[in-house]
């Protein structure tokens, strides 16, 4: 007996949609994807800041964190690699 396994979506695109769109009836959320090496700003929550001290540190986006929705970024002020969810990206630079 020979059993042939076929893709559940066939070989031709159906209505020009991705498999995710066919299963979920919506487009995937890709807003958290950013180009590697882009400029970013990290919210400083670790230091005791004064009233006039800057609350953002400049950095460079390195990669996505493995375990959670955090980002791994290089902090230019402290010269360290940090994991943070409080990151704003400048994708145009």
Image (cartoon, rainbow, N blue to C red):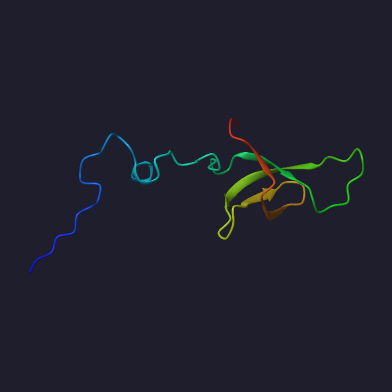
Extreme front residue here? 25
Which residue is found at the position 88% from the left and 41% from the top?
Answer: 53
Which residue is found at the position 55% from the left and 59% from the top?
Answer: 66
Q: Is residue 13 left or right of residue 29?
A: left
Extreme right residue here? 51
Locate the C terminus and report the quarter of the image it occupies: top right
Locate the N terminus and report the quarter of the image it occupies: bottom left
Report x, y in % for residue 26.
42, 39
Report x, y in % for residue 24.
40, 45
Extreme top residue here? 92
Report x, y in % for residue 86.
70, 46
Q: Is residue 69 left or right of residue 30?
A: right
Q: Is residue 22 left or right of residue 80?
A: left
**Residue in front for this viewpoint, 77 or 45:** 45
**Residue in front for this viewpoint, 54 or 11:** 11
Report x, y in % for residue 71.
62, 50
Which residue is found at the position 23% from the left and 52% from the top?
Answer: 7
Q: Measured along the vertical axis of the image, is residue 42 above or below residue 91?
A: below
Hey, which quadrant is residue 55 in on the image?
top right
Q: Is residue 46 left or right of residue 31?
A: right
């Amino acid at each position: 007996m020979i059993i042939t396994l076929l893709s559940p979506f066939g070989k031709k695109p159906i209505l020009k949609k991705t498999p995710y769109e066919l299963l979920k009836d919506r487009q995937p959320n890709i807003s958290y994807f950013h180009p590697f090496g882009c400029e970013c700003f990290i919210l400083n929550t670790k230091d005791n800041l004064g009233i006039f001290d800057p609350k953002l540190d400049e950095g460079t986006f390195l990669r996505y964190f493995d375990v959670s929705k955090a980002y791994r970024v290089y902090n230019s002020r402290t010269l360290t690699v940090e994991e943070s969810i409080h990151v704003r990206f400048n994708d145009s630079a």
